[in-house]
Amino acid sequence: MERRSGENKNIAVSAFLLFTFGIALFCFLLPANLSEKDPENTVSLSAHFDYKATTAPNALHPSGGTVPVGETMIKKITTGIPVDWTISLTAADEVRAVGTYEAVVAIKAESLWEKEFPLVKKTSFEKVGTSLVLLEEKSTVDLEKLNAFITQVEEETGISPSKYSIEIIPRLDGFIQSAGVERDMPHQEPLIFQYGFDSITLASDKTSTLDIEFGGTPSIPNAVNLGALSISIQSARLISVLLFLITLATLLAMNRPIWVKRKRAPNDVITKKYGSRLIEIDPRQGEWMDLPVLHLTSMKSLIRIADEKELPIFFYKQQEEKGTYFILDGHFHYKYEIVETNSAINNREWVKAYAEQ
């Protein structure tokens, strides 16, 4: 009954081993990542700046006020720079733009320092379409305020940089969504003026355009769904391999040979160690039996006496695991006998003989 039960366990474990192997093979055949082609769409984000100059009354402009200018303005008579700017978006297919925008004006003193001042407060937007105006603002850079700040810093630091720059920086934060795919809103280039000793000169383009591409084949991690549980392919591979190895180890443990050193019979142990010195005889020739017998407790003692007296060692087997070893010197019958293999005494003698190898 026990043997049949063991066979049933082997069959069950072997079946589970094949099952885990199949699961592992299935997981390794599945791709770790999936490629899903996104709908293509091209989106252009454009920024356009236009500016004028606000001047104090002067010989060129007796009434002062806001006047159109070219790329260079005269610093001494210019009190402000009115700026109109528009950030717009065009797309081949409908998109959704969500985010916030704000603007600052920054003064930069070469690599020594820079300072930002708010120009447009943060405003949120959400628009849908193919042609969108995300930002349309009018604001004025107050040069008198900037000059006062520069003068204060120069007086406090004792440093007057050779040149400054003024940057009008629009900041958009958000995303553009096309057919469910999102792209971050790109940063816009600032409008830059070189702020010299006697002039203010445009140092950047008034118009810039950035293209945002939608489409391609992004890589998506693959997963195995087990009911409500979703496991990545990488994790499923690891778990299935571990299950396979554990099951294999269990099956091997159930069927492994018992790797225990076979207890050789004491006769075999002694024969292996002292075989060249032993002379096997027929126990029926018992002429020596009339001699007084000295029983020895170990084979080692018998060997020592044989060496001292230079005598041969005789032996005969009574059974496979029993035997008698002796020497004769004409006066005594020195004997070491292996008896009752299952007895505690013989087990002790066997251990002694085994240890003498």
Image (cartoon, rainbow, N blue to C red):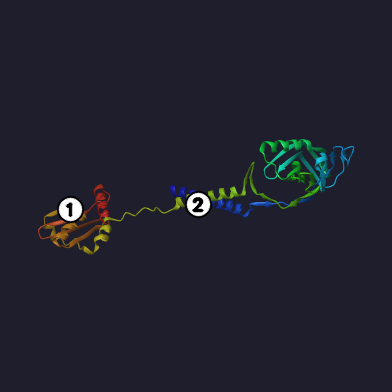
Q: Label 1 belongs to which residue? A: 296
Residue 79 horizontal/vertical position (percent): 81, 38
Q: Which residue shows up at 60% across the image and 49% down it?
A: 234
Label 2 neighbour load within 10 Å: few <14, some 14-19, many 20+: some
In terms of depth relative to the viewer, which is nearer, 255 or 101?
Answer: 101
User: Label 2, on which residue?
Assistant: 248
Quarter of the image where one finds residue 58: top right
Query: Which quarter of the picture shows residue 129?
Result: top right
- Left or right of 53 in this view: 348: left
Q: CA distance from mark 2 to mark 1?
A: 53 Å
Q: Type of residue at label 2?
A: Leu
Labels 2 and 1 touching (C-beta < 8 A): no
**Location of residue 240 in the rendering, given as x and y in whole percent from the top left corner:** 56, 49
> Relative to 81, does residue 40 appear above or below in the rendering?
below
Amino acid type of the residue tagged 1 in the rendering? Leu
Labels 2 and 1: the sequence-earlier one? 2
Q: How many C-alpha atoms fall within 10 Å of the one at disc 1: few (<14), some, or many (≥20)?
A: some
Q: Nearer the viewer, residue 5 or 357?
A: 357
Q: Height in image: 336 above or below 47?
A: below
- Residue 341 placement (x, y as % from top left): 26, 51
User: Among all residues in the image, which is located at the extreme front?
Assistant: 59
Q: Which sits in the foreground, 219 or 90?
A: 90
Q: Is residue 105 visible?
A: yes
